[in-house]
Image: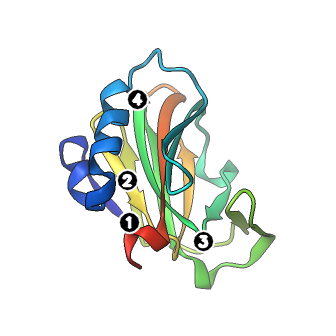
Amino acid sequence: MITDRMDYLIDYIPEQYKRCVRDFLAQVSPDMEEKRYEISGSHVFAKVMSYDTRESKNCKIEAHNRYIDIQGSITGAEGISVFNRENLRIVQDYDRKEDNMFFNQNDQIPYAASRNMPGIFSMIFPYEAHRPQETVKGYKNHVKKFVIKLETAEYGR
């Protein structure tokens, strides 16, 4: 996982997508509609969503195979914990259409964690299982966020 300031997000994007991702980021605002946004066909797209955050023990651990997640908060904050997916037991097999799979909540300790709030993003790679939606102490339990999905084949992995 990479966590950095939004000011530097474009530095992590492959050259052929920098302009279209920059155009998407320019329109991000608290009153943005919650939906899927096409950035560059199926190679790069974004989803805007909102939900209430929860205690870590009540959050799902997930992973993706096809896309890198770039998650950023528009309003509010959420914690994201990251695990080595090889050390987790699958509880919901990979869904190719949704590009996700889910893992058990065991006593595995995350090897990294971030607290996304406006101005901060986290980039999560397919080899990393992650647990978003965690409540961040000192923030209300509601977050509005975007997730940019960047296809790994185009990323050069």
> How crowded is the residue under tag 4: few (<14 C-alpha within 10 Å), some, or many (20+)?
many
Between discs 3 and 1, the one toward the N terminus:
1
> How crowded is the residue under tag 3: few (<14 C-alpha within 10 Å), some, or many (20+)?
some
Write down the residue under mark 4: 74
Point out the residue furthest to the right here: 92
Name the spot of residue 23 as percent of width and height, x first: 32, 34
Write down the residue under mark 3: 65
Figure quadrant of the C terminus: bottom left
Between discs 4 and 1, the one toward the N terminus:
1
Cβ atoms under marks 4 and 3 closer than 8 Å: no
Name the spot of residue 22 as percent of width and height, x first: 28, 40
> How crowded is the residue under tag 2: few (<14 C-alpha within 10 Å), some, or many (20+)?
many
Cβ atoms under marks 3 and 1 closer than 8 Å: no
Circle 2: element type:
strand
Between discs 3 and 2, the one toward the N terminus:
3
Tag nearer the camera, 4 or 3: 3
Cβ atoms under marks 1 and 2 closer than 8 Å: yes
Question: Looking at the image, which residue is at 60% across and 45% down?
Answer: 55
Question: Looking at the image, which residue is at 27% across and 50% down?
Answer: 18
Q: Which mark is residue 1?
A: 1
Marks 3 and 1 sit apart, C-alpha to C-alpha, by 15 Å
Marks 3 and 2 sit apart, C-alpha to C-alpha, by 17 Å
**In the displayed structure image, the side of residue 24 where residue 151 appears, left or right:** right
Residue 146 in view (yes/no): yes
Marks 4 and 3 sit apart, C-alpha to C-alpha, by 25 Å
Marks 4 and 1 sit apart, C-alpha to C-alpha, by 19 Å
User: What amino acid does circle 4 point to?
Assistant: Ile
Between discs 4 and 3, the one toward the N terminus:
3
Q: Write down the quadrant of residue 21 in the picture.
A: top left
